[in-house]
Image: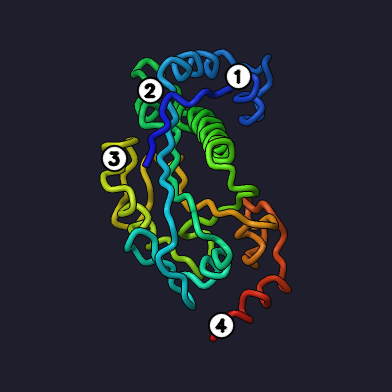
Amino acid sequence: MEILANIPVNITLKKVLTRLHISETDSDAKSVAGLFDWAKEVLNPKALYDVCYIDVNHDDKVVLNGITFTSRVLSVNLQKAHRVFPYITTCGIELETPPSDFQDFMVPFWLDAVKELALGEAYSYLRKYLIRQYRPGKLSHMAPGSLEDWPISQQKELFRLFGDVDEKIGVTLSDSFLMFPIKSISGIFFPTETNFESCQLCSREDCPGRRAAYDEHLWEEYHKHQP
């Protein structure tokens, strides 16, 4: 198990303003700039990961370090894998409490843009770090809650792999299995010969987070593995 802290990030004010659709001449730009200056000083995104070897992979059960995950899609994806990389990544708790002198009601919205950019940088850094450190080849990932097949309740099992995640990187899990800070992500990286995105198996229309088109034929392929 390893903690990656003080992850280098390359977030600029221009990127934040672009994310917020605010021009540099907009009346809000100065306020965003002040908030961003504070955020840069405290920003500390983190990642926690482990290297796990698969104990059992049968039907819809995958066992890692004695902890059982239930997902047929995950099981099929890991059929050719021996080693996987569970992870939790966060923008960092440091951005949750801005100074009291930032009074604008838009501050939480502006700060969300910084958090999203920080989380994206941390996730990208972790992925590249794993590839550089362990040379697994091409990596794909799955996350609890990304598909009905792997419900968000399995966050609890994922957190159990790491012990006290709050103490390690400041991320907690609610009774409804949501992470805090909200701008945190978790899942399992696994080696694959072809790119996989959970979106390919999700038919939900107009999803703002969609990264790949729904593939009905691919869904049928996964169903062929049912006993």
Helix, strand, or loop for circle 3? helix
Q: Earlier in the sequence, mark 1 or mark 4?
A: 1
| Extreme residue toward the bottom, this view | 227
Image marks 1 and 4: residues in contact by CB distance under 8 Å: no
Amino acid residing under circle 4 = Gln
Packing grade of label 2 (10 A; few <14, some 14-19, many >=20) is some
Query: Looking at the image, is mark 4 or mark 2 nearer the viewer?
Result: 4
Residue 72 is left or right of residue 198, and the answer is left
Q: Earlier in the sequence, mark 1 or mark 3?
A: 1
Q: Which residue is mark 1?
A: 12
Query: Looking at the image, is mark 2 or mark 3 nearer the viewer?
Result: 3
Q: Earlier in the sequence, mark 3 or mark 4?
A: 3
- Mark 1–mark 4 distance (CA, rounded to whole Å): 48 Å
Amino acid residing under circle 1 = Thr
For the residue pair 124 and 63, the one nearer the viewer reads as 63
x, y percent for residue 35: 48, 18
Q: Which residue is mark 2?
A: 98
The residue sitting at 32% across, 48% down in the picture is: 162
Packing grade of label 3 (10 A; few <14, some 14-19, many >=20) is some
The residue sitting at 54% across, 86% down in the picture is: 227
- Residue 226 marker: 4
Residue 143 is left or right of residue 139, and the answer is left
x, y percent for residue 1: 37, 42
Q: Which residue is mark 3?
A: 166
Q: Earlier in the sequence, mark 2 or mark 3?
A: 2
- Mark 1–mark 2 distance (CA, rounded to whole Å): 18 Å
Helix, strand, or loop for circle 1? loop
For the residue pair 203 and 110, the one nearer the viewer reads as 203
